[in-house]
Image (cartoon, rainbow, N blue to C red):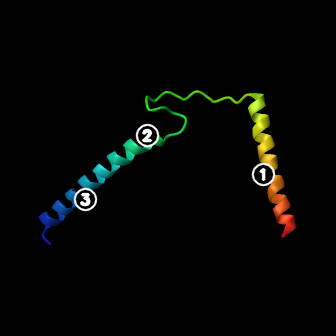
């Protein structure tokens, strides 16, 4: 391989990597948590006390079910 061919191959690889980088940047900006697409922080979501109680009760039922199934084996 000549010096020019090696440089051409490197340039081609660099352009491919730059395209991949652009794709990853555009997709990762959508997945960034806590920041909207406009770059503004998202508002914190607040649960009501009743919702917290319902979630806690449901989790306790799941734990009780698991414990019951484990003890019956």
Q: Residues within 10 Å of mark 3 (few under 14, many from 20)?
A: few
Which secondary structure lies at badge 1?
helix
Q: Hey, which quadrant is residue 43 in on the image?
A: top right
Q: Quadrant of the C terminus?
A: bottom right
Is residue 29 shown above or below 12? above
Q: Nearer the viewer, mark 3 or mark 1?
A: 1
Q: Position of residue 8 (x, y in %)?
A: 16, 60
- Residue at 46 percent across and 30 percent down: it is 39
Left or right of 26 in this view: 8:
left
Q: Which of the two residues, 38 or 50, is positioned nearer the viewer here?
A: 50
Q: Quadrant of the N terminus?
A: bottom left
Q: Nearer the viewer, mark 3 or mark 2?
A: 2
Q: Earlier in the sequence, mark 3 or mark 2?
A: 3
Q: Which of the two residues, 3 or 38, is positioned nearer the viewer here?
A: 38
Left or right of 54 in this view: 42:
left
- Residue at 77 percent across and 37 percent down: it is 54
Q: Which mark is residue 40?
A: none
Is residue 63 shown above or below 37? below
Q: Which mark is residue 62?
A: 1
């Amino acid at each position: 391989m000549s010096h020019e061919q090696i440089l051409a191959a490197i340039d081609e690889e660099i352009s491919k990597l730059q395209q991949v980088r652009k794709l990853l940047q555009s997709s990762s900006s959508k997945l960034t948590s806590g920041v909207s697409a406009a770059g503004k922080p998202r508002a914190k979501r607040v649960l009501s006390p009743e919702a917290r109680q319902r979630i806690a009760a449901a989790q306790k039922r799941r734990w009780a079910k698991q414990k019951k199934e484990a003890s019956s084996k």
